[in-house]
Structures are given as structure tokens and as C-alpha cells.
Image: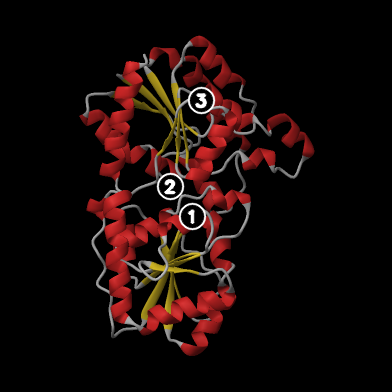
Amino acid sequence: MKILFLPKYTRTGASSRLRTYQYIPLWEKAGHQCTVAPFFNDIYLEELYNKRKISKGNVWKCFWRRFGWVLRARQFDLVILEKELFPFFPAWLEKFWAGMGVRYIVDYDDAIFHNYDQHPQARIRKLLGKKIDRVMKNSFMVWAGNSYLARRASVAGAKNIKILPTSVDLNRYDPAHLNGKREIKIGWIGSPTTLRYLKGILPALEQLKEKHGFSLTIIANGEGVGFSGKEEKLVWEEQKEADYLSALDIGIMPLKHSPWEQGKCAYKLIQYMATGLPVVASPIGMNKTVVQPGINGFLAGSKEEWVDALSTLMEDKTLRQKMGKAGRKMVEEDYTLAKNWEKIQGWMVELSGEA
């Protein structure tokens, strides 16, 4: 089968790396001919992550390149589209595809429909509020990273909805050796655009510092959050992230409480657990599915709950090890690349039967 993959980003973008690129070797090994054409390029991501001015000329080049692939879509047996063809543009071309018989699967790991239906400008809400619903409805199949996204697809009238959690290649993660001697390391990993979540629990970390000695490791672009204690600022690299995580003792995933966060797929938690780390996370969205309080981590909604949960873990090495093992077991059972690939292969058989 000839398959055209249209991710939003290059491999540098986390969502595209996890939802598209890590599967390409499996598709190719299964005998499929794969063409991958991201929308945004590395120039855009470098500008975005380093908070530089976005080059409009480069963005227009990205638009024109994607338009060329839209016109060539009928040359392929299947198109797998991440999120949408064009940001902030009506779903006309996705509808055009449907009318032309282009079979496309659309893949979501974020609630990007809220970029439109909750946009601060009324004209955007009016023009594009139902855009992603139309993209879903016209698709051959929707892959949703969690139940919140799947429910939206169902309301939109999508014909074929599958839950595909964001997962890890477990072979890349070795369980951490949680220490009981050196200073505890609390860690956070993510893109620079989501550091605001970590800043949201800074008061809790500052209070915790008064009672416990620990260091805060931030794996992003070398940027920190202004923690007054020991703050280790690392530059994320794909080849090093597993080693960075294995040096931690506790992984954290704070979030805001808003509709956008309901679409998050708890990938940080899955990474931490794959490494055998206990976790503390905000009780929001899929975090409540992944975290089993008292078994593989804790949920913390207030400053006091964050302080209590982290204190409990820092004071008890045996508990950290027990929770870390439970988290690793959950990932092995439910959140691995191999498990997802089994699902996808089954869906491809289903797709072939409806061709």
C-alpha cells in the first residue's frame, strides 16, 4: 500500500515524532511504501521554541508545499493526516478530498478544536468553530489519543473512531535506579511552550525546599522557571532523553484546569513510568486514567497536595521503588509502541475490507 503521511511537524516536534515518525519503520517493515511530508519545517520549530520572531515567508513556503501534497493525494492508497491540512483555514480541502474519494485517517493527540471554538475572536469562532468536527466527519477513520478526543469525534459524526494512546518504544527506556543517598531529583520534561505549567507549581516547590533538600531538573531547551533552589536546566535531545530521565527520582506533570488540557494524552507520565519513576500529576484529563493514586503515584490539585505528595515520596525510598515498578508494569501492559502497532494492523485489515 502507498501511504502518504502528513504530520504537523518534522521529527523535532514531539506530537509528530510520537504519532507518526516512530511508526514509519514498522509500516515499511510491513511492506508499505511510505512518503512523509510535514507541514512545518525545522526553521519554524527553532523560531517557536527559542521565542524568536516567526518568519512569515517561511510559513508561506510551508503552506505552498502542503498544497502540493493535497493535489497529489489521489496518487496514494491512504493518507494519514495529523490534526488538519492547514491551520486556521476552513475544512474545504478535507471535504474536497472526501468528494474525490481520497481515503484519509485523521490523528489527534490534542484538543485542537478548542483553538477555534474557544478562540478569543468571535469571527474565528464563527468561521472555524466547527472546522475540526468537519475534518473528523469527512475522514475514513479517526485516531484519538484519549476518550475526551474520541467523544468530540463522536459528536462530530465521525464514522469510525479508534482510541490510540500516545505510547513509548519501551526498548528505549531502562528502569531508573532510585537512590537513597544522594540528593533527590524531581524532574519535568516537555517543550518550551509548556513550561508555563511547571511555573504554576513553583510556589509549592519553593515551600518544599524549606523542608527538603532536592534539585529540580528541567528537560526542555535549557530554559528554567526561576526556582530559587538547585535548578538543573538541560537541553532536550532525542538520543539523550531516556538517560536524562533515568537520572531522576520523581517525575511531575502539572497542568492547568481548562478544556484544552482535557485533550492532553499524559505522555510525560508514560515516559516517567516507562523509566520506573513514581509520579505526581494534576488531576486533569487523561492524567486521572494513567495515575493510580497510592499505587504508581499521586494526584495533586492544590499547593498543599503537591507539597504533601512530593514530601511523601521524597521521604520513602521503598515507596518510590514500589510505585516505580507499578508504573512500569502499567506501561508494559497498555502504552507501548508494540501494543499500538498491533491495534493499527488490525484496523488496516478492517480498512482493506471496506475498500
Query: Which numbered disc, 1 or 2, marks the residue that appears first in the sequence?
Result: 2
Percent x, y of residue 237: 36, 55
Q: Is residue 238 left or right of residue 85?
A: left
Query: Which numbered disc, 2 or 3, marks the residue that appears first in the sequence?
Result: 2
**How far apart, in angstroms, are the residues tagged by discs 1 and 2?**
8 Å
Residue under pointer 1: 191
Q: Would you say residue 144 is visible in this rendering?
A: yes
The type of residue carrying mark 3 is Arg
**How far apart, in angstroms, are the residues tagged by discs 2 and 3?**
20 Å
Q: Residues within 10 Å of mark 1 (few under 14, many from 20)?
A: few
Question: In the rendered image, which quarter is residue 89 located in?
Answer: top right
Indicate whether 269 appears above or below 65: below
Percent x, y of residue 2: 32, 19
The type of residue carrying mark 1 is Ser
Residue under pointer 3: 66
Q: Quadrant of the N terminus?
A: top left
Q: Residue at x 36, y 66 (%)?
A: 296
The type of residue carrying mark 2 is Ala
Percent x, y of residue 4: 39, 24
Q: Residues within 10 Å of mark 2 (few under 14, many from 20)?
A: some
Q: Secondary structure at mark 1?
A: loop
Q: Secondary structure at mark 3?
A: helix
Identify the disc placed on residue 226: none
Residue under pointer 2: 14
Indicate whether 36 appears above or below 44: above
**How far apart, in angstroms, are the residues tagged by discs 3 and 1?**
24 Å
Contact check, label 1 and label 2, Cβ < 8 Å: yes
Query: Which numbered disc, 3 or 1, marks the residue that appears first in the sequence?
Result: 3
Q: Residue at x 44, y 82 (%)?
A: 311
Q: Quadrant of the C terminus?
A: top left
